[in-house]
Image: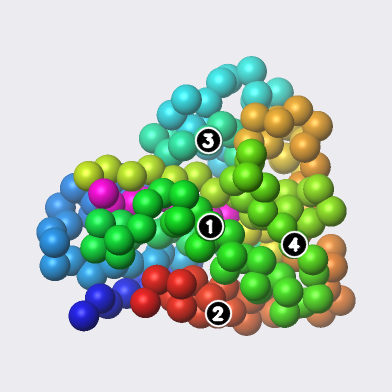
């Protein structure tokens, strides 16, 4: 039987969590339960393993960390829900494209509950509302096991996104759930997202 453990980690530095994900992925066995880690990060820019530094226009006082995930540059900060998907793709019998689709669908279904018409794009992983990015994906798969995952903008300071070309796209605008919802309960949004994700992988 496949099990899925959810860990709520609170506000944690990016580097510490990244190193913990690597350790978990390297040490897990064929019987290790899959896990979802939900958390927030203090302000940080992260650059994917093939990311180009020119997409960081002005980092200012915000640190930049070169990560081993896919994708280009993104920003993480309080008010954004991060879910790291530590999954055995071989056991789930899915590939990376299917993993991306399931994560995107989890977000699209969540936003639909708020009457927000959100969509995925084949050419640029993530979720978009009226062409603006509301959720970013960055993944790494090692020996059939995934880590890194999803960042959903809920109710945060979006200004740091203006200091980068988000996900490597010049002029790409970003948005957040708070722009479309009059009243928002962050914990409830997190619960809904985790419920959607769990249903995708059980």
Spatial CA distance of label 3 from label 1 is 16 Å
The residues bearing labels 4 and 2 have C-alpha atoms spaced at a distance of 19 Å
| Colouring style | rainbow
Between disc 3 and disc 1, the foreground one is 1
Question: Is residue 146 shown in magenta?
Answer: yes
* Nearer mark to the viewer, of 1 and 2: 1
Task: Count every numbered label the image shows and give the total.
Answer: 4
Pointer 2: residues within 10 angstroms few (<14), some, or many (20+)?
A: few
How far apart marks 1 and 4 lie (CA) works out to 13 Å
Highlighted magenta segment, given as a residue range: 144-151
Disc on the earlier residue, 4 or 2: 4
CA gap, disc 3 and disc 4: 21 Å
The label on residue 110 is: none
First in residue order: circle 3 vs circle 4: 3
Residue receiving disc 4? 118
Residue shown at 53% from the left, 57% from the top: 101
Q: Does residue 189 show up magenta in the picture?
A: no
| Disc sitting over residue 191 in the figure | 2
- Report the magenta stretch's main SS: strand
Is residue 114 shown left or right of residue 11? right
Is residue 3 in sight in this rendering? yes
């Amino acid at each position: 039987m496949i099990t899925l453990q959810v860990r709520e980690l609170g506000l944690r530095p990016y580097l510490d969590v990244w190193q913990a994900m690597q350790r978990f992925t390297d040490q897990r066995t064929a019987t290790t339960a899959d896990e979802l880690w939900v958390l927030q990060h203090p302000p940080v820019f992260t650059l994917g393993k093939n990311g180009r530094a020119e997409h960081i226009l002005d980092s200012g006082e915000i640190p930049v960390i070169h990560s081993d995930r896919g994708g280009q540059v993104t920003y993480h900060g309080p008010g954004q829900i991060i879910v790291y998907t530590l999954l055995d793709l071989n056991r789930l019998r899915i590939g990376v494209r299917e993993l991306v689709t399931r994560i995107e669908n989890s977000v699209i279904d969540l936003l639909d509950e708020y009457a927000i018409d959100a969509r995925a794009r084949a050419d640029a992983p993530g979720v978009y509302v009226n062409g603006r990015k509301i959720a970013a994906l960055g993944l790494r798969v090692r020996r059939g096991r995934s880590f890194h995952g999803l960042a959903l903008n809920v109710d945060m300071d979006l200004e740091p996104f203006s200091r980068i070309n988000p996900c490597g796209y010049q002029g790409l605008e970003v948005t957040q759930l708070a722009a479309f919802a009059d009243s928002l309960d962050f914990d409830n949004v997190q619960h809904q997202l985790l419920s959607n994700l769990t249903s995708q992988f059980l």
